[in-house]
Image (cartoon, rainbow, N blue to C red):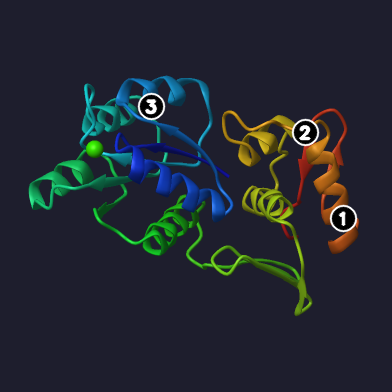
Amino acid sequence: MRLLLVEDDKLLGDGIQAGLHQAGYAVDWMENGEDAEAALRTEDYELMVLDLGLPGRSGLDVLKSLRAKDNDLPVLILTARDTVSDRVKGLDAGADDYLIKPFDLNELNARIRALLRRHKGRANPVIAHGKLILDPAAHTVTLDGAPVSLSQREFAILQMLLENRGKVMSRARLEEGLYAWGEEVESNAVEVYIHHLRKKLGSGLIRTMRGVGYVIDKPA
Ligand code: CA
């Protein structure tokens, strides 16, 4: 899953990017509002972590113009200014949640998971598909009660397919979710991960749509 981080504080941005990367997200990090808007125009993200106090175009401006375009991307705002009015302005401008700096990375991760599942229309924190259960918080997968060991990228692909059941995900779309800008995409990587997933979870789970992509069907 690919996230956009907008933060002008280099030390903090670096820490957040590393923390989110470790949690399995591909993270593009922009240091100002103009770059964030350029990235939003060209890339597909699942969520944006947005600092409000940015040089030049403010986080609030970025948020307002995003919502003016009817873009429903989940947005979590960060603010150092511990004033009620900033948070109210941010939420009223279309933010879905906020954190006040300094914050704990574990809390940021938990809030991101909550926003992503709500955005996908889920209240249950685990994703169940027949005998397969994926827990995004614990980063575990079980099949018929038995733990299945997956690499971080296998896990990410499985989660993307499960969260988009019934929708065909193209190879490019899956790659976007795996790799941030500047990361080298290995050729055929997605095919290799799918192959591993089928070996571990059975060949019937993920269907190949020739020339289009991959899909996990909705449960009957
Ligand atoms: Ca700032």
Residue type at tag 2: Glu
Quadrant for the N terminus in the image: top right
Q: Secondary structure at mark 2?
A: loop
- Extreme residue toward the front, this view: 11
Q: Residue at x 34, y 37 (%)?
A: 10
Q: Earlier in the sequence, mark 1 or mark 2?
A: 2
Label 1, ligand 1: CB separation under 8 Å: no
| Quarter holding ligand 1 | top left
Question: According to the image, label 3 marks what residue?
Answer: 36
Question: According to the image, label 1 marks what residue?
Answer: 198
Residue 129 drawn above or below residue 40? below
As drawn, the label of residue 23 is none
Residue type at tag 1: Arg
Marks 1/2: CA–CA distance: 20 Å
Find residue 186 and report its image quarter. top right
Q: Is residue 98 left or right of residue 20?
A: left
Q: Earlier in the sequence, mark 2 or mark 3?
A: 3
Which mark is in front, 3 or 1? 3
Label 3, ligand 1: CB separation under 8 Å: no
Residue type at tag 3: Ala
Label 2, ligand 1: CB separation under 8 Å: no
Horizontal and vertical percent position of residue 187: 81, 30
Query: Which class describes the residues within 10 Å of circle 1: few (<14), some (14-19), or many (20+)?
Result: some
Q: Residue at x 24, y 53 (%)?
A: 101
Q: Earlier in the sequence, mark 3 or mark 1?
A: 3
As drawn, the label of residue 186 is 2
Q: Secondary structure at mark 1?
A: helix
Residue 154 drawn above or below residue 44? below
